[in-house]
Image (cartoon, rainbow, N blue to C red):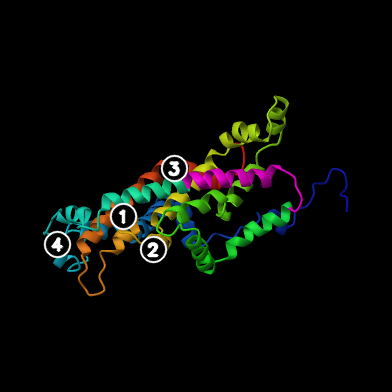
């Protein structure tokens, strides 16, 4: 309804009142007005969680410096009895327990496994991400389907095959499958990473005269360093900590890995040397922690990113 000229519009009481805004709850208002309190609560929770997660590891390190008869006497990290004999006795170990040999065997198997996964998984991923061929989707689905198969399902057929090939008591059963792109997770990871790379780079390299091998070596691999670093890190951790595989195929103590050497400290008759066990367990964590710190940046980029920035 229009008003007459010269007359001011009459405002009703409802219109003259400001809009009523509900006040936030007292607890929420205090938190929003006190960012310092919220930050303190968040960091306190993270510190408590960190202590809970690191305490078993710190206790193991502390127990490695105790005598065998006082390893389980306290839940504290350190006691008054301090000794380094567990490291010397555990490293020498006796006639069949030579941890320098175990570390060398584990390092050899791990390095070969990393090289195999980097080579085979990257080539397979390039084929699925860039090439076009018949039954491509079917083959890729079969590769991903192997992720649903537990290792224990294929353990017996693999052992029979490797035994017939004469590979038992050698490192070949632990290394050779890595060169055949048998780790489907890493194939999938690198396929997703390569698919995010622009194809214009491939076209530019093809104009310069590069074939598929040149594009793979000069374009794809340099840009896939984060995915390669993630693959190398996960392969290192899995291979270094693997116990079932070496237990199946490596029967000679000269071929044992670190995980088998640690298991030798446990005796079913109760004559276990826990001090030496914790000492060698502490040393076995050093390569993993060092490699993880060195490849941490590549791990974050490989998992969190999916293309060029």
Q: Which residues are magenta?
A: 114-135
**Total marks drawn?**
4
Determine whether the residue tagged by mark 1 lies in a helix, strand or loop.
helix
Q: CA distance from mark 1 to mark 4?
A: 28 Å
Instruction: Report x, y in % for residue 217.
Output: 60, 34
**Of the residues tagged 4 and 2, which is closer to the observer?**
2
Counting residues from the start of the chain, the first of labels 1 and 2 encountered is: 2
Q: Which residue is mark 2?
A: 247
As measured in the structure, the alpha-carbon distance from the residue carrying label 3 to the one carrying label 2 is 29 Å
Q: CA distance from mark 3 to mark 1?
A: 31 Å
Question: Which numbered disc flags the more N-terminal residue, 4 or 2?
Answer: 4
Q: Which image quarter: residue 278?
A: bottom left
Q: Which residue is mark 1?
A: 254
SS for dot 4: loop
Q: Secondary structure at mark 3?
A: loop
Predominant secondary structure in magenta? Answer: helix
Decide which of tag 3 and tag 2 comes sooner along the chain.
Answer: 2
Give the residue pinned by disc 3: 295
Say whether residue 94 is magenta: no
The reply to whether discs 1 and 4 touch (Cβ–Cβ < 8 Å) is no
Mark closer to the observer (1, 4): 1
Q: Are marks 1 and 2 in contact (CB under 8 Å)?
A: no
């Amino acid at each position: 309804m229009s008003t007459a000229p010269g007359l001011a519009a009459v405002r009703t009481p409802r219109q003259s009142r400001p809009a009523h805004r509900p006040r936030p709850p007292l607890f929420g208002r205090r938190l929003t007005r006190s960012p310092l309190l919220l930050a303190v609560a968040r960091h306190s929770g993270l510190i408590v969680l960190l202590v809970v997660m690191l305490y078993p590891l710190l206790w193991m390190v502390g127990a490695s410096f105790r005598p065998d008869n006082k390893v389980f006497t306290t839940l504290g990290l350190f006691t008054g009895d301090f000794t380094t004999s567990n490291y010397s006795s555990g490293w020498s170990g006796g006639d069949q327990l030579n941890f320098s040999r175990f570390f060398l065997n584990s390092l050899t198997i791990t390095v070969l496994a990393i090289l195999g996964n980097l080579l085979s998984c990257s080539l397979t991923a390039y084929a699925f991400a860039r090439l076009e061929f018949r039954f491509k989707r079917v083959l890729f689905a079969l590769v991903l389907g192997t992720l649903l198969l537990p290792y224990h399902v294929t353990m017996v057929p693999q052992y029979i095959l490797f035994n017939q090939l004469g590979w038992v008591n050698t490192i070949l059963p632990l290394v050779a499958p890595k060169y055949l792109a048998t780790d489907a997770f890493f194939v999938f990871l690198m396929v997703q990473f390569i698919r995010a790379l622009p194809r214009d780079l491939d076209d530019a390299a093809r104009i310069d005269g590069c074939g598929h091998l040149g594009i793979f070596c000069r374009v794809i691999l340099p840009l896939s360093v984060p995915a390669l670093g993630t693959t190398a890190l996960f392969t290192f951790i899995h291979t270094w900590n693997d116990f079932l595989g070496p237990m199946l195929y490596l029967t000679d103590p000269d071929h044992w890995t670190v995980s088998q050497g640690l298991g030798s400290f446990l005796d079913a008759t109760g004559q276990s040397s826990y001090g030496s066990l914790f000492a060698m367990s502490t040393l076995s964590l050093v390569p993993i922690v060092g490699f993880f710190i060195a490849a941490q940046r590549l791990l974050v980029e490989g998992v969190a990113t999916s293309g060029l920035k």
